[in-house]
Image (cartoon, rainbow, N blue to C red):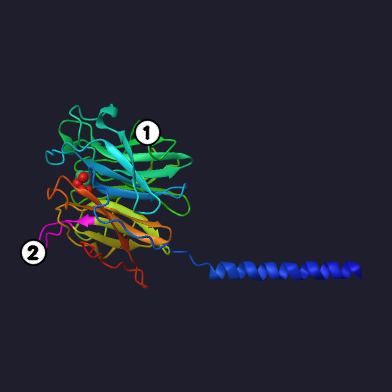
């Protein structure tokens, strides 16, 4: 009898556990922390552009922008990457300069031209991808350098550059996207041309043939790939040269069921700002999506740009609401 009661109790506990686990799964709703945003621009002590934002395992949000040096000479003198981090969007830490063109052995002798970067985490290491020319003839000699570190903010050592990418003319603005199954993808390109390719697990070699990204209406530069609800999103800067609408770049997006496209152009995430260029990233932090981008509202100069952030919202059908610029 005692044995029977023990078995009945054990069975009941098992059933309750199964039911409660399945309810927890079905009802699992991601908590959204509604953080206050800082005033834009949120970094005011130095100029920066092209922010790539990532959330790393320590729960902080990190932003890797390019650095506009003052005084500028076009975008030629951009150099000395800094990384910034926060855990509340308002208080930002500048972790200081962590990479300069003088650290790049294969780089152009005159330095500068450290343009829009990205960073990725894999197997305990942080990989920093930066476009930099290898010759004086800068726009024909772009390479994507790779630096690696055991931590996200400093000690980056330049390993070399990604080989096998093909024609270098105007090929800038690297972006690395790691899919849910762990496959890393690499995208880059300016001047109207963008390519994508898988990366090997070592994050320093391409895995297969590069492929042109197609279906991107009016693509100019600045790719950024992310995923929401199983759909891949490709954000980029357009040329915005349609007659009668200006010339300042906008951030457009396209979607696909495959991280290598073909892409279907959708809408505009950010219309023209006060800057000719536009370049940014989309990231989810504490359950809320954000757009990081740049404008020129401090300097009113196109090569002295400043970092901005706004909340980004999806509609029920997966489309993205256009952000109001400037935020009031
Ligand atoms: O910041 C230098 C270049 O300007 C970037 O590589 C482009 O995306 C544009 O923002």
Mark 2, secondary structure of its residue: loop
Q: Is residue 107 above or below residue 125?
A: above
Camera-near label (1 vs 2) is 1
The dot on residue 243 is 2
Q: Position of residue 250 (x, y in %)?
A: 19, 59
Q: Is residue 25 visible?
A: yes
The residue lying at 25 percent from left, 48 percent from top is 50
Q: Residue furthest right?
A: 1
The residue lying at 17 percent from left, 60 percent from top is 272
In the picture, residue 313 is in which quadrant? bottom left
Quadrant in which the C terminus is drawn = bottom left
Magenta region: 237-249
Q: Position of residue 210 (x, y in %)?
A: 32, 46
In the picture, residue 170 is in which quadrant? top left
- Find out if the beta carbon at label 1 lies less than 8 Å from the nearest ligand 1 atom: no
Q: Residues within 10 Å of mark 1 (few under 14, many from 20)?
A: some
Between the residue at mark 1 and the residue at mark 2, the CA separation in whole angstroms equals 45 Å
User: What type of secondary structure mainly makes up the magenta span?
Assistant: loop
Which residue in the structure is indicated by mark 1? 156
Q: Is residue 190 visible?
A: no
């Amino acid at each position: 009898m005692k044995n029977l009661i023990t078995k009945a109790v054990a069975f009941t506990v098992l059933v309750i556990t199964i039911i409660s686990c399945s309810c927890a799964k079905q009802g699992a709703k991601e908590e959204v922390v509604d953080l206050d945003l800082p005033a834009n621009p949120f970094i005011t002590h130095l100029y920066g552009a092209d922010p790539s934002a990532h959330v790393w395992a320590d729960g902080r949000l990190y932003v890797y922008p390019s650095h506009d040096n003052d005084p500028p000479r076009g975008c030629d003198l951009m150099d000395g990457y800094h990384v910034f981090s926060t855990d509340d969007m308002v208080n930002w830490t500048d972790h200081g300069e962590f990479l300069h063109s003088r650290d790049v052995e294969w780089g152009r002798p005159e330095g500068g031209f450290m343009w829009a970067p990205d960073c990725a985490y894999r197997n305990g290491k942080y990989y920093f991808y930066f476009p930099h020319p290898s010759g004086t003839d800068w726009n024909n000699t772009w390479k994507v350098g790779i630096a690696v570190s055991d931590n996200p903010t400093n000690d980056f050592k330049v390993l070399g550059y990604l080989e096998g990418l093909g024609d270098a003319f105007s090929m800038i603005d690297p972006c690395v996207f790691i899919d849910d199954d762990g496959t890393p993808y690499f995208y880059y390109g300016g001047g109207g041309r963008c390519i994508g390719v898988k990366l090997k697990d070592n994050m320093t070699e391409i895995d297969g043939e590069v492929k042109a990204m197609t279906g991107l209406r009016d693509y100019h530069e600045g790719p950024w790939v992310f995923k929401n609800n199983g759909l891949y999103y490709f954000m980029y800067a357009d040329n915005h040269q349609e007659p009668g609408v200006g010339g300042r770049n906008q951030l457009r997006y396209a979607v696909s069921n495959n991280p290598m496209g073909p892409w279907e152009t959708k809408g505009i995430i950010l219309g023209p700002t006060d800057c000719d260029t536009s370049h940014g990233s989309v990231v989810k932090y504490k359950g809320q999506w954000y757009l990081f981008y740049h404008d020129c509202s401090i300097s009113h100069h196109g090569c002295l740009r400043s970092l901005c952030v706004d909340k980004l919202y999806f509609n029920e059908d997966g489309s993205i609401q256009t952000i109001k610029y400037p935020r009031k």
